[in-house]
Amino acid sequence: MCLGIPGRIVEISDARKKLAVVEVGGVRRQVNLACIVDDQHPVEGCVGDWVLVHVGFAMSRIDERQAAETLEILTQLGEVQEELAAMRASGKA
């Protein structure tokens, strides 16, 4: 399964190479912005944008509401996975 994780662009690290730093849940990672920049939305204007990050690339812009909803769903999925793992370990699943 391929997931895009919501993150917020907090700084541009190399505008020429279209690289930025994105924060996801308090963790900062460098990502490539090539998929989301164009003449109407240049690299320099991306700080503060919410994006879906997959394998080191910002794949698309999303709004803050979408980011919050997606993060909540991912959190819930993680909790479900933890519960299933615990049930398997106890022999109840």
Image (cartoon, helix red, strand yellow):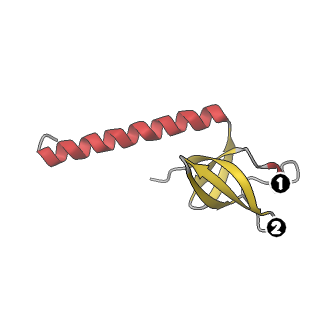
**Residue occupying the point 64% across, 53% down:** 22
How far across and how far down the image is residue 44, in percent? 83, 54
Hey, which residue is sitting farthest front in the picture? 26
Secondary structure found at label 2? loop
The numbered dot on residue 44 is: 1
Comes first in the chain, label 2 or label 1:
2
For mark 1, does the 10 Å Cα neighbourhood hold few (<14), some (14 to 19), or many (20 or more) residues?
some
Within-10-Å neighbours for mark 2: few <14, some 14–19, many 20+: few
Q: Kindly state the secondary structure of the residue where label 1 is placed.
A: helix
Mark 2 residue type: Arg
In the displayed structure, would residue 16 be above or below residue 45? below
From the viewer's side, name the closer residue of 4 and 76.
76
Q: Is residue 68 left or right of residue 47?
A: left
Q: CA distance from mark 2 to mark 1?
A: 10 Å
Disc number for residue 16? 2
Figure quadrant of residue 68:
top right
Q: Splitting the image into 4 quarters, where does residue 63 fall?
A: top right
Where residue 34 sits: x, y (%)? 74, 60
Question: Which residue does the image show at 21% across and 44% down from the upper left?
Answer: 86
Report the amino acid beneath label 1: Glu
